[in-house]
């Protein structure tokens, strides 16, 4: 199993079929899914047939996946996943950052640690020009992670959801970090 990135406490690697049970469990936690589906679990067959193949897919713009299974370096416990993938199919200079962690991994700094390492790798090694990230405006935990990593609020927008979830009336937010801003932050 090939490691894409290591931090002091985490290993990020490409997903494999053997991650199915971990993903089913992750997407079954109502608190994990609160800002994604209103707390509804993703059915196991949907995780198997749609979610896992999407997480394993290599993006044409850079020939590698954009989603990474995360586990603790000590003990190997699965803690969730991180995303750093091209927004467009045909170019890799603008990427989306994302993360979904098990509830028992919240508050340990893993989201910030993994996200910061991916952002740094994207700018330093992968030719990324801009990192973007989105969440619900009311998702204060995720917004704090984005800000700790150096992203800044770009905009708030409102969607028409066929099945709105609690808090959706406050909109969605997009955060962004450019290569130039990242370099300025790193120089401090």
Image (cartoon, rainbow, N blue to C red):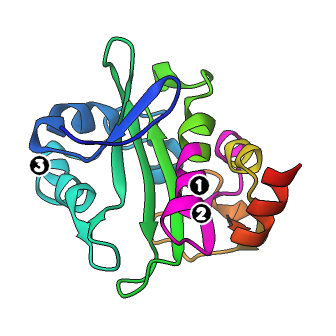
Relative placement, left or right, of 151 versus 42 is right
Relative placement, left or right, of 147 versus 35 is right
Task: State the residue in front, 160 or 64.
Answer: 64
| The stretch drawn in magenta includes residue 57 | no
Residue 171, given in percent of the width and then of the height, sits at: 69, 66
> How much space separates mark 2 and mark 3, taking CA atoms?
36 Å
Q: Is residue 164 visible?
A: no
Residue placed furthest toward the top: 75
Element assignment for label 1: helix
Q: Is residue 150 above or below residue 162?
A: above
Residue 30, given in percent of the width and then of the height, sits at: 42, 34
Task: State the residue in front, 70 or 64.
Answer: 64
Residue 57, given in percent of the width and then of the height, sits at: 21, 64
The residue identified by callout 3 is 45
Relative placement, left or right, of 30 versus 171 is left
Work out which quarter of the rendered image holds the N terminus and state it. Answer: top left
The residue identified by callout 1 is 119
Please rate how many residues cluster around mark 3, counting C-alpha atoms within 10 Å: few if below 14, some from 14 to 19, many from 20.
Answer: few
Residue 52, given in percent of the width and then of the height, sits at: 20, 52
Q: Residue at x 47, y 19 (%)?
A: 104
Q: Earlier in the sequence, mark 1 or mark 3?
A: 3
Q: Residue at x 52, y 66 (%)?
A: 96
């Amino acid at each position: 199993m090939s490691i894409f990135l290591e931090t002091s406490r985490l290993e990020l690697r490409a997903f494999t079929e053997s991650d199915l049970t971990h993903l089913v469990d992750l997407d079954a936690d109502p608190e994990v899914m609160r800002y994604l589906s209103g707390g509804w679990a993703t059915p196991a067959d949907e995780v198997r047939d749609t979610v896992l193949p999407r997480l394993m897919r290599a993006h044409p713009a850079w020939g590698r996946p954009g989603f990474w299974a995360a586990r603790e370096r000590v003990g190997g416990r699965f803690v969730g996943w991180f995303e750093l993938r091209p927004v467009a199919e045909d170019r890799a200079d603008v990427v989306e950052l994302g993360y979904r962690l098990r509830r028992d991994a919240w508050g340990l700094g893993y989201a910030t640690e993994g996200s910061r390492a991916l952002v740094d790798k994207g700018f330093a090694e992968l030719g990324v020009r801009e990192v973007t990230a989105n969440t619900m405006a009311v998702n204060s935990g995720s917004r704090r992670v984005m800000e700790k990593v150096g992203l800044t609020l770009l905009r708030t927008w409102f969607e028409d959801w066929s099945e709105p979830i609690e808090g959706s009336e406050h909109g969605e937010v997009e955060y962004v970090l450019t290569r130039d801003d990242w370099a300025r932050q790193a120089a401090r």
